[in-house]
Image (tube, grey):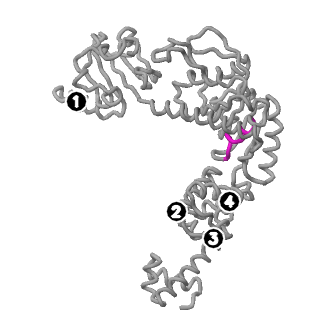
């Protein structure tokens, strides 16, 4: 086995450090910086030339440095949330560096910048809270009602709305189940708006969007000075913020097992303790959870606690996927067309029946979210006053694999192809070479299709 020559090891190490997308810092046993990669320069705004061969404590407060802590404890840490600067959030993995005799010669820190994730999470929470306040103002004026944003007249969606309205009047915990994109958060908001808590906060937590290291502080908050980088006055967690209102736990199946235990305790005892605090804070919040996972299967695999499942599953709202309520599709399409024409200041087009059939016959694996995106794309791209099935096909790749009515749509596609070939042959005065070129197919394919469709030329 070949070994790396000692004279080349420095270059290998430098290349390895610079290739990393994370900030990497190495200090010696005295706390002097030996390595500081370009990502560390970018994240912390300190050039290599300024920090190399200088004590790292010159640039950071001692209490803000995990590296110096590692020199003392000689114990590695992995994926620990840290805030080394007021505007920086990182996940740190640090280890002591030992020589062949086990003597400490330094420490290495690998910092993953999660500042954008933390800020996005805060922005989403703030936006949702502000949106909820606006909705509450409209509700007070009697302009809209609970579940008004949930469109459709199918029996499945109507029965789900009726059950949601009935359970909303109680304080029972609700578990909303359904595929991604069916509108679980809209139902959660509707339950809140139809409840006696409607004038109190609606606080959402997306359990699938929070880095695992941040779960506890996001859920329960922390007292001042409880860890490095904490706000000087401490911070209330989402559970505490929802006191008197509704706490919406989206993607509950993504909650780590240790957090499931702590959440169960909150549900049982109706109190929460901030990180670093000794005082229990009473909370009176309504819990609504949502998932697109099969929690019963997760329980069998040991991924979800059975006791928490039964605590959450007092009343279940099961939202049908869009492919099982196709009678709602025209209503949704019309609503989204009006919404995006207003947004982009365009005239509302006329959708021919053939175009609407394209929407109805598609299976919509992404459900309402996917439908909304396709309608928005249609309004942006297609400028025609009348929209045909062909227009839909040009912006939306429909195949027989993702159709509900495969036979019906296959026939419609064949009819469209038949008409298009006849149209091009007329335009080219029967010139098959020119027609094939315009259609983007070979002459042989054109001859076969002329024969297949029995087209007179």
Circle 1 residue: 3
Give the foreground label among 4 and 3. 4
Chain part drawn in magenta: 182-191
Q: Determine the residue positioned at 66% across, 16% down.
A: 272
Give the foreground label among 4 and 1. 4
Q: Are marks 4 and 3 in contact (CB under 8 Å)?
A: no
**Count of picture labels:** 4
Q: Nearer the viewer, residue 300 or 200?
A: 200
Q: Residue 410 — which label? A: 3
Give the foreground label among 1 and 3. 3
Q: Does residue 431 lie above or below 361 as drawn?
A: below
Sequence-wise first label, 1 or 2:
1
Report, in whole angstroms, how far the alpha carbon at label 4 lies from the one at label 1.
68 Å
Q: Nearer the viewer, residue 273 or 135?
A: 135
Q: Does residue 346 lie above or below 260 as drawn?
A: below
Report, in whole angstroms, how far the alpha carbon at label 1 lies from the one at label 2.
59 Å
Q: In this image, 165 relative to 241: left or right?
A: right
Report, in whole angstroms, how far the alpha carbon at label 4 lies from the one at label 3.
24 Å
Sequence-wise first label, 4 or 3:
4
Circle 4 residue: 334
Sequence-wise first label, 4 or 2:
4
Residue 324 x, y percent position in the rendering = 73, 54
Q: Determine the residue positioned at 37% across, 11% down.
A: 62
Tell me which secondary structure the magenta stretch mostly adopts.
helix
């Amino acid at each position: 086995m070949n070994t790396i020559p000692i004279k080349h090891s420095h270059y290998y190490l430098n290349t390895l450090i610079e290739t990393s997308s994370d900030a990497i810092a190495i200090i010696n046993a005295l706390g002097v910086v030996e390595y500081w990669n370009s990502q560390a320069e970018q994240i912390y705004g300190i050039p290599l030339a300024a920090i190399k061969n200088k004590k790292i404590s010159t640039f950071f407060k001692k209490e803000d440095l995990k590296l110096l802590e590692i020199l003392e404890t000689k114990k590695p840490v992995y994926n620990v949330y840290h805030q080394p600067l007021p505007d920086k959030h990182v996940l740190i993995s640090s280890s002591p560096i030992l020589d062949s005799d086990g003597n400490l010669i330094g420490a290495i820190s690998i910092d993953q910048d999660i500042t954008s994730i933390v800020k996005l999470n805060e922005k989403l929470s703030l936006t949702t809270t502000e949106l909820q306040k606006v909705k509450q103002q409209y509700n007070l004026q009697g302009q809209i009602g609970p579940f008004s944003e949930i469109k459709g007249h199918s029996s499945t969606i109507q029965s789900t709305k009726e059950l949601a309205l009935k359970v909303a009047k109680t304080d029972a915990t609700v578990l909303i189940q359904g595929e991604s994109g069916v509108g679980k958060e809209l139902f959660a908001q509707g339950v809140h708006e139809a409840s006696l808590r409607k004038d109190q906060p609606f606080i959402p937590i997306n359990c699938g969007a929070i880095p695992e290291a941040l779960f506890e502080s996001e859920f329960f908050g922390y007292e001042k000075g409880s860890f490095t980088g904490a706000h000087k006055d401490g911070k209330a967690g989402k559970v505490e913020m929802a006191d008197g209102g509704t706490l919406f736990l989206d993607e509950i199946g993504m909650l780590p097992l240790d957090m499931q235990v702590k959440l169960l305790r909150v549900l049982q005892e109706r109190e929460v303790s901030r990180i670093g605090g000794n005082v229990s804070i009473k909370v009176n919040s309504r819990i609504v959870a949502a998932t697109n996972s099969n929690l019963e299967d997760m329980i069998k695999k040991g991924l979800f606690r059975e006791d928490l499942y039964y605590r959450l599953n007092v009343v279940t709202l099961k939202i049908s996927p869009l492919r099982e309520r196709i009678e709602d599709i025209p209503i949704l399409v019309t609503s989204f067309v009006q919404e995006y024409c207003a947004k982009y200041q365009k005239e509302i087009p006329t959708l021919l029946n053939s175009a609407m059939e394209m929407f109805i016959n598609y299976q919509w694996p992404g459900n309402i979210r996917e439908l909304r995106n396709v309608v928005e794309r249609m309004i942006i791209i297609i400028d025609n006053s009348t929209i045909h099935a062909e227009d839909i096909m040009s912006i939306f790749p429909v195949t027989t694999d993702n159709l509900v009515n495969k036979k019906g749509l296959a026939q419609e596609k064949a009819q469209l192809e038949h008409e298009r070939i006849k149209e091009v042959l007329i335009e080219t005065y029967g010139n098959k070479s020119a027609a094939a070129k315009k259609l983007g197919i070979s002459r042989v394919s054109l001859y076969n299709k002329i024969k297949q469709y029995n087209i007179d030329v």
